[in-house]
Structure formats: C-alpha cells, structure tokens
Amino acid sequence: MDFLWPYGLSGAHPFSCFLLFLVVAIVSVVFYRLAFHPLARFPGPVLAASTGLYEAYYQCIKDGGGRYWVEIEKMHQRYGIKTPGPIVRINPREVHIADPDWNAVYKYSSKASKPKWFYFRFFGKFPSTNVAESHALHQLRRGPLQVYFASTNIQQYMPTILAQVDKLCTRLRAADGCVVNLSDAFRCLATDVATGFAFGAPFGHLDEPTFDREFNLAVKMVVRTSMWSRHTFGLLLPMLHSLPESIAKKMNPAFGRVKWMRDRSMSKPEPAPGTPYDMIQTLMSSNLPPEEKTFPRLFSETRSVIMAGTETTATTLVCITSNLLRDPTKLQKLRAELGAAEKTKGSPLEYSDLRELPYITGVVNEGLRMANPTPSRLPRVCEDQDLKYKQYIIPKGIPAGEHSNQTTISTTTQDTHNDASVFAQPFEFIPERWASPEERRQLGRHLQPWGRGTRLCLGMELATTDLYLAVSRLFGPGAGFEMRLYDTVDDDWVAYHEWFAAFPRGRGLRVKVSRTGEGKSEGK
Ligand code: HEM
C-alpha cells in the first residue's frame, strides 16, 4: 500500500485517500451483492450479479450494442442444470424468468411498478403513460388514453388506414423495375397510420421521395443514444435535449424533427363543432388533474405514440413480407385465399372479412410471433408482496429509489414465442399452425407481442388492423405489382440490436418491384 501512503497516514495525499475509499466502497458493495443481497442465492454470472457494468457493456459496446437480450438467452442455457434454467440473476437487482406459464408479476393483483432506471433513463424526461413508474400513476394516465384507443374509434378511422395502405401500393406500382427498401416504406406507413389516428391527420411520411430514409436512420441513432443514456445515469438525453435546436439538428436531423412533430401534433386550433377530438384534445378535455395536462406531459404522449407505433408495426410487416417472398408456396396460398374470398364477396375485402380468413390470420400471427419487434425485456418491481417462482421467493422491491435492496423481475415475450414446447419448429414461419379455430385458441394464449397485464399495448387493435389491411393489399389479387427479394440476406432485416424496439444489423429489406396485370404499361 506504499503507493497510496507514500508519506504515512497522517500526511496522506487527499487523492490517495479518495482512491482508497473508492476501492473499499466498491469491494463492500460487490461483497454485499454477492453474499447478502436478497437475490444472492439466485443463479447467474458472478460478474452480472456484481455490477451493472456487465449489462452496460453488452447494451452499449459489444457488437454495436443492444445485445444483452441475446446474452440473457445464453444465461438461461448456461445456468440450467439439465434443461435451460428458467430463472437467472441478470444484474445486481434483477432476475429474469423464461417460462411461458409464469406471469404473476404482470397480473393486475400484483400492482407492479416499472423500474425508473430502465424506462425513465432510456426515454428521457418525458412523463408519458408508458414510463409512469407507479401502478397508480399509470392507471390515472392510461384511463383517458384507453377511451381514445377504443374499438369504435378505430372502426371510424378504418378509411384513413386504407387510404395510407393504398398510397403505399400506388407508390410501389409506380416503382416498376426499381429497387425499394421496404423497411423504410413500412416505417412510413406505420408512422402515417399512427399519427393520423392520434392527431387527426397523417404526418405524410409516405409522400417523402426516399421513404424518409434519413429520418429512419436518425431515429436509430436516437434510440442508440437512449441506451447510452440509460447506462450513464440518464444524463445524456437531457443534455442533448437542452442543446439549442440549430446545434441539435446538425448533430442528428431527428432532433430537428422534434419541433416539427410538436407543431403538427400540439399546435392545433379547437376542433369545429361536431368534429371529433384528436388524442391530445381528448386528454385536455378529460378529468385528468391539471398537473397531468401540462404541455410537456401531453407532448410526451405524442412522442410515445409515434415511437411505440412505428418501429413495431413496420418490423412485423417486414418479417411477414420477407417470409412470404422467400416461400412461393405460402405466397400462393395467401393469394388464392384472398382471391377466392374477394370473388365470393364481389368487392374488395374489408377488415371484418379478413379476420374470418384462416390463412391470412396465420400469416399475421406468425409475423407477430416471429418478428420480435420488442426484444427488450419488460421489467417490473412488485412493491407490496413477495412473489414465488418454483422454489424461489422473489422479495418485494422498492421501485423509486436506487436502493440496492430493490428487486426487479422481468420476462421477454420472445422467449415464449421461441419455446418449442409451445410452438413446434419455432424458427419456421408456418401460417398453417393457426389453421383451425382450436389451434388459434390454444396457441393464441401464448402469442404475446403486445406485452402483458396492466401495461398491455394500447395500439394493439390499430396495429392489427394495419397489418391485415396491408398484407391483403400488398399480396392480394388486385395489387397490380409483384415483389422479389433483391440482394437481401436475413441480417438485413432480422432483429439484432435491442434499443427497446428491434433494429437489424443490415440495410433493410429490399425488393425489386414489377408491375403486373392491366395497368402494366401505364406510368412507364
Ligand atoms: C405490431 C405492433 C406493436 C407491438 C408489437 C407493440 C408492442 C408493445 C409492447 C410490448 C408494449 C408494452 C411495453 C412495456 O411493457 O413497457 C406496448 C405498449 C404500448 N404501445 Fe404498442 N405495440 C405495437 C403497436 C402500437 C401502436 C400502433 C401504437 C399506437 C399508435 C402503440 C402504442 C402503445 C402505447 C401507448 C403503449 C404504452 C401502454 C401503457 O403503458 O399503458 N403500440 N406496445
């Protein structure tokens, strides 16, 4: 220890004292976490149990970041004795469970909260419903939103969804002989559907000549930065948000869009009498208390809906399209089903017709099962009761503080979707597995792309409608164009990085479009 105490204890250099204090503090914390923490007896890597830096390395650095979800899968393999171990400690305060039959923490009765460090630090200081920490606050915020996302509202919005899908199909028909990046195009469709529903008029991304590729890339950079923010005490995002707009814009065009988004969604006049309220106007007229109706609060909902609705729906459509295009037999079956149904009906199929058709239902369900649009685990803190998993008692936690006693529990929906005991050959796209009503009922219980419990996705019905209508128009007999995969490998579209939503490693799903049928020579 001479290097620390070159002049003896009394004359110790303050920096050396600080260093020594730091080392002792770190060793004590690690010792506590490994020996005395309530989760100390749970299986898992020693390094992960010792320090959050282990997770930070996988989320921020390893292979470009966003890779802890893969490492967690490996832990379940490694820490099982004969079969994969369903419960592992993945960081000092969190256990992760991979068991399709366990969901106790998501039940209404558990009144679980969301851990602040995971959500708030990632999404920045935007107090939206999806980052509401406590169960009570979440219930308060979700109430009026749930009214807005009701089925009747979505039914009324159907013509606008169809108009967006038709706009995309028109653009694809016009791209005869060209290569189109569908990952970008589907993001535009999803954004226009979500924003049209929430703010009364679509943002118009489908009109952008490049399908707004720059914006899509910029979003990727923002969520990557968010992951860094989560692992740097949530400091990074607020710092970037406090930059003057001109500088922020230069750093990343997506930051420049924030004002644009704000103007489109928030600065609207009172609706004319008889015109329906949009989402923001609905929240303003609700019985939320005044502190829940401030500008930052409502703008947070805007941002949250755009982020929640865009990447997820687009990733699912990309997965469906890619699987259909590489298997002509399945594409043929889908076309035949749509063709026959349309012939019987004598007019274009509507959403209610499509829901009755087994093959397209199988196609959409397989997309939702395999796309993995939210590879993130969904962590919860149960405050008022200990929970039991097999022989393990998971002690209740303290959600708000950074106390080391806090215990967080998480699961990842994709673990269930990839479980061979539930979905045979889980890595194969098999719409046929959903053929009969009984199979749909049985398997449907384990189809959980929307998350679980009280925090279930609010846009579930909107996204499902969008998916059915898009698949039926892109691949139906009247599409007027065909697509072939173009210089695309799995890496171009399969989920690789988890920045809450899924991002592939490659360039996106690219197809070559050729016009078919009557209008073939038009517009050439
Ligand atoms: C295939 C498409 C979609 C998938 C797979 C999906 C998935 C999810 C998941 C897993 C959650 C739970 C997150 C958590 O527990 O932290 C969630 C929440 C949410 N989603 Fe979706 N989503 C989709 C589309 C949409 C759309 C289109 C919208 C709206 C336009 C939307 C709005 C929301 C909102 C507002 C929440 C927060 C709900 C709450 O906290 O109460 N989602 N979504």
Image (spheres, grey):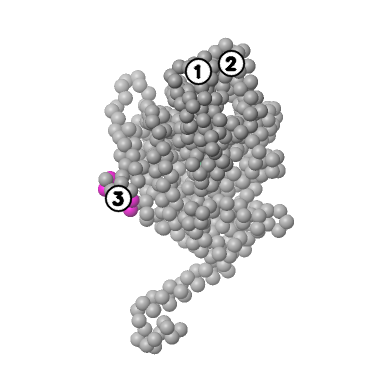
Q: Which residue shows up at 66% across the image and 34% down it?
A: 430
Which residue in the structure is indicated by mark 3? 242
For numbered disc 3, what is the local secondary structure?
loop
Between 303 and 288, the one lying in front of the other is: 303
Which residue in the structure is indicated by mark 2? 342
Q: Which residue shows up at 33% across the image and 51% down it?
A: 240
Q: Is residue 188 left or right of residue 331?
A: left
Q: Nearer the viewer, mark 2 or mark 3?
A: 2
Which region is colored magenta?
Answer: 239-245
Q: Are marks 1 and 2 in contact (CB under 8 Å)?
A: no
Relative to 127, say whether 85 is above or below: below
Confirm or reject: label 1 Cβ below 8 Å from ligand 1: no
The amino acid pointed to by label 3 is Ser
For numbered disc 2, what is the local secondary structure?
helix
For numbered disc 1, what is the local secondary structure?
helix
Q: Nearer the viewer, mark 3 or mark 1?
A: 1
Crowding near the residue tagged with mark 1, few <14, some 14–19, many ≥20 C-alpha atoms within 10 Å: some
The amino acid pointed to by label 2 is Glu
